[in-house]
Image (spheres, rainbow, N blue to C red):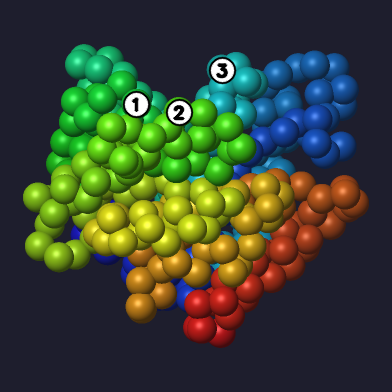
Amino acid sequence: MDFAKRLHKRILEVNSRVCLGIDPRPYGHPSTHPDQFEGDSAQVAKAVVNYFREIIEATQDLVACYKPQSAFFEAMGIPGLVAMAQLIADIKSLGIPVILDAKRGDIGSTAEAYAGAYLTNTVFAADALTVNPYLGMDSLEPFIQAAQANERGIFVLVKTSNPGSNDFQGLETLENMYVYDHVAYQLGHINRSLTQGSYGPVGAVVGATHPEELEHLREVMPQSILLVPGYGAQGGTAEDIVAAFDEEGLGAIISSSRGLSYFDEPDETATRARAATLQMRDEINEAIGLL
């Protein structure tokens, strides 16, 4: 079963469009704070694994997928990479899709190496990978080929949620379109060539903080699953993301990281994570008329 079908099957099984981001911040909680371990990076990484295992245990029936952010693991060095591999394996063992947020992008053999690392059967391999298209469409080819060959997916950065995204993505071109429009039209063409009317392996990242653009890009890329970050901590709301979904409430997942895993009160984190995830799930479902 290809990635799009697996993800939609999961969405329907749990009636959730929530993508819970796993962004380890060791200084963000007493149980993982490096001072607790005299700066021993291996012990910090072990604590991080335990921290997120509790969150996963508490939320596994409420999410469509999990999204580890590789940068936060890389910042912990080799122990952090081991921690990332452990959590990916844990999530896979539950039969829940994993999207690795690594935003890789390169050309030629380097892109092939990235694709092999994250879209095959290595310890870092996920069900889908975020990728950066701004080196050109040829930089996406190795990722697309690996995704097809291994029934995986990719999520291509199109219109990101950060305030500075307009610096380049929002530049107008001679064709009276924006740069992100050009990327979106290319992705729409690719999926049409790979599928016959169904969702394809090439998804797109479109921020919840740009609701008007989100509606437009949903129309431009009707066969792309949309990964929508920016919900919660970055200001996106349930009303902002309604246009991301098709008429059946499919075709998109909404991501939140800090808002579902780190809280002002450090106690009972797993309980708080479950309550926040449940609230987000219900807010989204109510907004799209499925509650």
Closer to the camera, 187 or 125?
187
Q: Quadrant of residue 51?
A: top right
Q: Secondary structure at mark 3?
A: helix
Q: Quadrant of the N terminus?
A: bottom left
Q: Position of residue 124 (x, y in %)?
A: 41, 32
Label placed on residue 134: 1
Label placed on residue 168: 2
Indicate which disc, 1 or 2, sits on the residue closer to the N terminus.
Answer: 1
**Pointer 3 residue:** 78
Closer to the camera, 237 or 130?
237
Q: What amino acid is at disc 3?
A: Ile
Badge 2 density bin: few <14, some 14–19, many ≥20, Cα 10 Å = few
Q: Position of residue 183 (x, y in %)?
A: 29, 39
Closer to the camera, 16 or 29?
16
Q: Position of residue 289 (x, y in %)?
A: 51, 83
Q: Secondary structure at mark 1?
A: loop
Q: What amino acid is at disc 2?
A: Phe
Residue occupying the point 72% across, 63% down: 276
Mark 1 or mark 2, whichever is nearer to me: 2
Q: Position of residue 147 (x, y in %)?
A: 23, 41
Q: Are marks 1 and 2 in contact (CB under 8 Å)?
A: yes
- Evaluate whether residue 282 shows in this view: yes
